Amino acid sequence: MKATGKKILVIVPAYNESGSIKGTLQEIRQTAIDLDVVVIDDGSTDGTRDDVSSLGEEVVSLPFNLGIGGAVQTGFLYAEENDYDVVVRIDGDGQHDVRYLGDLLQPVLNDEVDIVVGSRFIPPFLGYRSSLIRRVGIHFFANLLSWLTRSRITDSTSGFQAFHRNAVKVFAESYPHDFPEPESVVVAKRTGLRMKEVPVQMRKRSAGHSSIRYLVTLYYMVKVTFAVFISMIKKQGGAQS
Amino acid sequence: MNAKVLSVFLALVLFVFIVELVRREKLTFKYAAGWILVSLAGLLLSVFDGFLHAVSRVFGFELLSNFIFFAMICVFVFLSLLLTILLCQQNSRNDRMAQKIGLLENKLEKITKRMDADTNSRET
């Protein structure tokens, strides 16, 4: 699927994912889409980098852990430097089902929108949709963001996203570090980037722990709500970085 | 009177200490400037304490000490906010640097590999 002749880059942020990174990469390679892959090793200490290198895949290793926002932004910088047209983010933990890569890419390849978000909450509901408490949180933010941006958003925490080079340019410059997924929705709205959701499936993480634990979910919700409101009234493209 | 002597003395010690830190390059002038101002203000206010009394009365404080505590707390809140801003700025710069290092390392690796391949192909 290179009909469009566009250069596609898959960013795989990974922090201590040696249990699942190889599987994720092999899955990505099995797709029929002509694409390049870069793993952003976010200061892992468990040999994630060696796992990636052993498969002969490209890896950018950060000297210490920056968190998901900083890691993904590194991918955007890489994409800009190497002149990619389209960027897809697929997390290294195996949560994102690569079979939906084509669906995710299509609207961006057609220049239809600048950001495509893979949503777990658009029918038909097939795969894993997170635990009850987190679903409450996700819906809360989806409603909040829909209201704030006057558009329909169903999955506010999905990191399974595709970006047009317009969006890559904005986010390479400044990308929200704290809570990139919900905040970037607001940034997109403010900077006039067009956005769309497509239905995808997700799986339970194949190894490791999610960075959002049950006990801190409420605290997380309060923080993100605050961050989203602040993001609404920010001056520049995104968070300062 | 003793309190006045003590506070003049402490303000002087602070001033000398800061100048010494700058001299030994433990503090850069950029960050020392604020502290020098603080110590000088402390010195002036200790010497001319009548001014503090007057201001404190204007704001309706019963005791001068209450006013001083209040003023100090305000200064410290402001100061810690300032330090947090600096910290965040440093943090962002650090992150940017980490990203650049990662990208440069990746590029360097690629170039080295290509050079090695070139040398090998020339040798064979």
Image: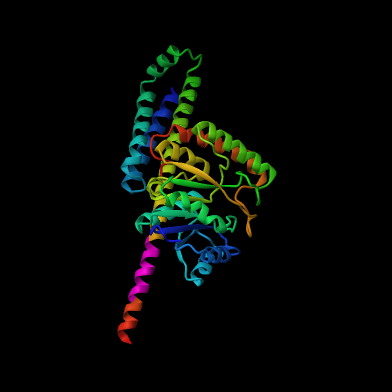
What secondary structure characterizes most of the magenta part?
helix
Residue shown at 49%/40% (left/top)? A185
Q: State whether residue A67 appears in this view.
A: no
Q: Position of residue B14 (x, y in %)?
A: 39, 36
Q: How many marks?
A: 0
Q: Report the quarter where the C terminus of chain A lies.
A: top left
Q: Image height check: is B107 above or below A125?
A: below
Question: Between A234 and B41, which is closer to the camera in this rendering?
Answer: A234
User: Image check: A190 left or right of A131?
Assistant: left
Q: Position of residue A25 (x, y in %)?
A: 53, 64
Residue B105: in magenta span:
yes
User: Image check: A65 left or right of B106?
Assistant: right
Q: Image height check: is A144 above or below A45?
A: above
Question: Between B59 and A227, which is closer to the camera in this rendering?
Answer: A227
User: Image check: B124 left or right of A232?
Assistant: left
Residue A208: in magenta span:
no
Question: Between A143 and A42, which is closer to the camera in this rendering?
Answer: A143
Say which quarter of the image contains residue B108: bottom left
Residue shown at 30%/83% (left/top)? B122
Q: Residue furthest front?
A: A3
Region of the chain picked out in magenta, as a range? B104-115
Question: Between B49 and A137, which is closer to the camera in this rendering?
Answer: A137
Q: Residue furthest bottom?
A: B124
Say which quarter of the image contains residue A193: top left
Q: State whether residue A68 appears in this view.
A: yes
Q: Position of residue A33 (x, y in %)?
A: 48, 62
Q: Image height check: is B79 above or below B119?
A: above
Residue shown at 53%/31% (left/top)? A147
Figure colour scheme: rainbow
